[in-house]
Image (spheres, rainbow, N blue to C red):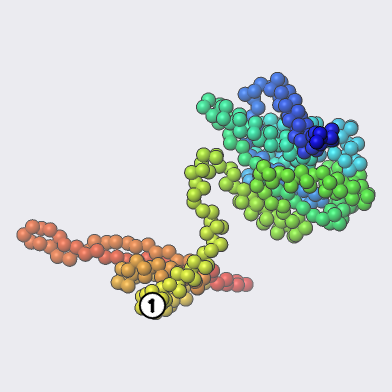
Amino acid sequence: MSSSPQSNAPSPADLEIKDAQLIFSRVWRELENSLGHDQLRFPKELILLGGAPGSGKGTNTDFIRSLRDITAEPIVISGLLNSPEAERIKASGGMVGDEEVFRLLLNELLKPAYRDSAVLDGFPRTKVQVECLKLFYDQMIQLRREFSATAQAHLFRQPTFHIMVLFVDEAESIARQLKRGEETLEHNAEVRQSGVGELWDERPTDFDPELARNRYRTFKEKTYDALVSLRKIFHYHFINAQAPIEVVQRNIVRELEYQSSLELDPRTYDSLRRIPLAEELVKGARQELVRRLDGYQVECPELLASVVEFIMSKMMPIVGRYAVAGRAVINTESPLFEDPLALAILIDVFSERGFRTTVDIHRQEIPQRIDLRSGAIETRTKRVYRITVRFTGSKIRRG
C-alpha cells in the first residue's frame, strides 16, 4: 500500500526542532563573526524564572538574587524587546518572534555584569526557545571541552542551569494583573504630583480584563507546554505561586537545593553519586531506629536495661538542669561503655526520645607502678566518655 503525501509530512515537533537549529546557527554564527569564537564567554550559572502572568516572577527575582549572591540586575526578557513592533505585539497580549528574543538574550548574556550568574525572567516561552536553550547548553559544554586544556580554561566553566516555574490559575492571574494595574496608576499619579520617583510601565493588559485573560491564555497555549517540555532536558518542579509569599520562597529554596548536585562537573558528580543524599537516608531513618531498638530488646535486654538505668540515674538529672540551654555535657568513666554496643544503644535511645547525642572517647595513660630495676613505668588506660546531649531549649520571656 502506498502512503499518502500527508503521512510523509514532518510533525510540528520536527518543524520546531528544525526552526530552532536554524535560528541557533544564524545567531551563533553572527556572534562568532562579530566577536570571535574565543570571546563567547557566558555566565557559569543561569537561573531561569518562568511562570504565568501575575505569578510573582518579578517579586521573587530579588529574593533569588539575594539567595545566590547575584549582584547583576535580572534580565527581564520583556524589557529587552523594546522595538516598536515588539511593543505593539506585547500590548495586544502576544509574543515577539523567537529569533529576535534569542539574539537579544545572547548578546545581553555576554556583558561583563553577567560573568558569573544571571537571572532570566520570562525565558523560554515557546518550544522553539526551549530547543534553542538546549542547543545553547550543549554549545557551552562544547566550549568548556574545547578550552579545558588551555590557559583560557577558567573563562569557560561548567555551565549550571537552574529552572524555577511559578504557576497560578487563570482567575488568580487576571486578578493579580488588574491589581498591578491599579497600583501602577496610583504610583504614577503620586510621582507626577510630587516629582519624586520613577514612573512604572503601564501595560495595557493590566487594565483590561479581556487583554489580561488573553495574556494568560497565550501562556497556557504556548508557554506552558514549552516549560513542561523542559523537563526532558533539565530537572525542576512547578512551584505553586498561589500560596503565601513565605511558602513560595521556602519552595524556591528547596528547589534550588534539589538542583544543587547539577552544579558539579560531571566527573566530580560521578565520583560522589554513590554517597546517598541526606533526604534519602532520612526517609527510612525512623523505621531503622525502631528496628534497632526492638532488636536490642530481643537480643541483649540486660544491656539495654543497664543503659536505660544509666541514662535515668546519671544523665537525666544533668540534662534537666540544662533544659533552658538545650545542651548538656556529661563525662563518665563507667565500665558499662567498654562494650561499644552500649554506646550505640545510648545514642539510639536518646534519638528515639528526640535528643541529638554525640560521644567522644578520651584516652589517657595513668601511671600504675615503676619497676625500680629497669625504670619502666607500667600504666593503665583511662577512658573518659564525653557525652553531649542537644535538644530544643526552653525560651525565657524577658520583660
Quadrant location, the C terminus: bottom right
What secondary structure is marked by label 1?
A: helix
x then y, percent, for residue 319: 45, 73
As drawn, the residue found furthest toward the front would be 1
x then y, percent, for residue 63: 69, 50
| Above or below 198: residue 35 | above
| Above or below 377: residue 353 | below
For residue 63, side relative to residue 79 (left or right): left
Q: Which residue is mark 1?
A: 301
Quadrant location, the N terminus: top right
Residue at 37% across / 62% down in the picture? 360
As drawn, the residue found furthest toward the left would be 373
Q: Residues within 10 Å of mark 1 (few under 14, many from 20)?
A: few
* Quadrant of the rendered image containing residue 301: bottom left
For residue 207, side relative to residue 224 (left or right): right
Residue 109 in view of the camera: yes
Look at label 1 and name its amino acid: Pro
Residue at 90% across / 41% down in the picture? 91
